[in-house]
Image (cartoon, helix red, strand yellow):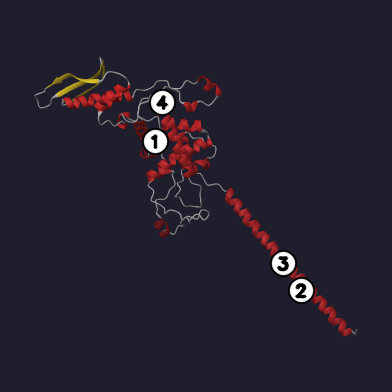
Amino acid sequence: MNLITRRRMLFTNNLLITKHFSRKNSSLSTKDAEDTIDTINTEDTKDKKNTKEKIPSTLYSLSARLNLNFANQNLLLQAVTHKNFHENDLLTNEGLQVLGNHALGLYVAEYLHLKYPLLPLPCIQQAITAYCGHLTLTVIGQEVGLQYVVRWNNFTDEELFLQGKEIPKKNKSVGKSREPVQRITQGTAISHALKAIVGALYIDKGPQSARQFIHDHILSRDVNMQDVIEIREPKRELSALMKRLKRPSPISRLKSETGRLSYAPAFVVGVYSGTEQLGEGFGSSVKMAEFRAGKNALLQYYLKEARDFTLPSIIDSHEKQATYIPTKVGDTPPRL
């Protein structure tokens, strides 16, 4: 092998070695770059998860006014965020609202059922609506200042699109299209937020705190219970009630009158079962006075309040359960 051939072989080997190491270094640099990008993305994701939303001062004021004392203030922020608030995929109060709605129904129904044990079922349902219905919760929420902290959007899909905001897409896991966004009023958002606060209390502090909140802010309000009782035929209903109670049939008696032949007569009628007067009414005619007397008798019976009753929901220990005496509840049928 001559000198020229050796030089050619040496040059070829050097060239192959150079190409090999250049490719290896290139692959290593690419791999390092990919690892660096993954690390940065992971850290950004962690930062986003660990970043908490800033709690506004108005929310702290609301918490102090209502004496909420949440261990996690972000739960209160979630409670005042309506499900149509489309910003940064925030947690909404939809689940808390459902829980709070059931807690409201439970504790309000329990209280009314024991306080008015003779009240018919339809009247109890009307009373529950009067205490914790949509309009009532809206008024309560406005009184405590929920309108200044609740987060909601009064936009439809078309308005969101025109404003350049992203519209939530359909749920791919379910495969069903999302229902169009309906316009939500401020009253609805406030009502939902108040229910969600009850649900958040139930989760964060327990059922006793939720029950205390309902008694302090919902059941402490005055509701005219006579307005929830609709009586169209008092005479017939009173006769059916006396028959169920195995008492003498009611009889109407004219107690007094004045100006029968004048322009403005007045009559007072009493309704009796045996010798016991059940009710009394007055009117410009005997028929009107008799109607009011029968209604007055039914209202006095239905709205008879139980005193010093014990709520079953406060029985939270075996000692209390051993000494608990259930309150006697009447059996007034839904319709007489």
The amino acid at mark 4 is: Leu
Circle 2 packing at 10 Å, graded few (<14), some (14-19), many (20+), is few
Q: Secondary structure at mark 2?
A: helix
Which is in the foreground here, disc 3 or disc 1? 1
At x 37% / y 40%, what residue is drawn?
134
Which is in the foreground here, disc 4 or disc 1? 4
Q: Secondary structure at mark 4?
A: helix
The amino acid at mark 3 is: Ser
The residue closer to the viewer here, 24 or 298, is: 298
Q: Earlier in the sequence, mark 3 or mark 1?
A: 3
Which is in the foreground here, disc 3 or disc 4? 4
Residue 23 appears in the picture as rendered: yes
**Residue 49 screen position, x and y as percent:** 58, 49
State the mark number for residue 66: none
State left or right for residue 190 relative to residue 14: left
State the mark number for residue 19: 2
**Residue 183 screen position, x and y as percent:** 38, 51
**The N terminus: image quadrant:** bottom right
Pointer 3: what residue?
27
Q: Earlier in the sequence, mark 1 or mark 2?
A: 2
State the mark number for residue 132: 1
Q: Earlier in the sequence, mark 3 or mark 4?
A: 3
Q: Secondary structure at mark 1?
A: helix
> How much space separates mark 4 and mark 1, taking CA atoms?
17 Å
State the mark number for residue 114: 4
Do the residues under discs 3 and 4 have CB atoms within 8 angstroms?
Answer: no
The amino acid at mark 2 is: Lys
Q: Earlier in the sequence, mark 4 or mark 1?
A: 4
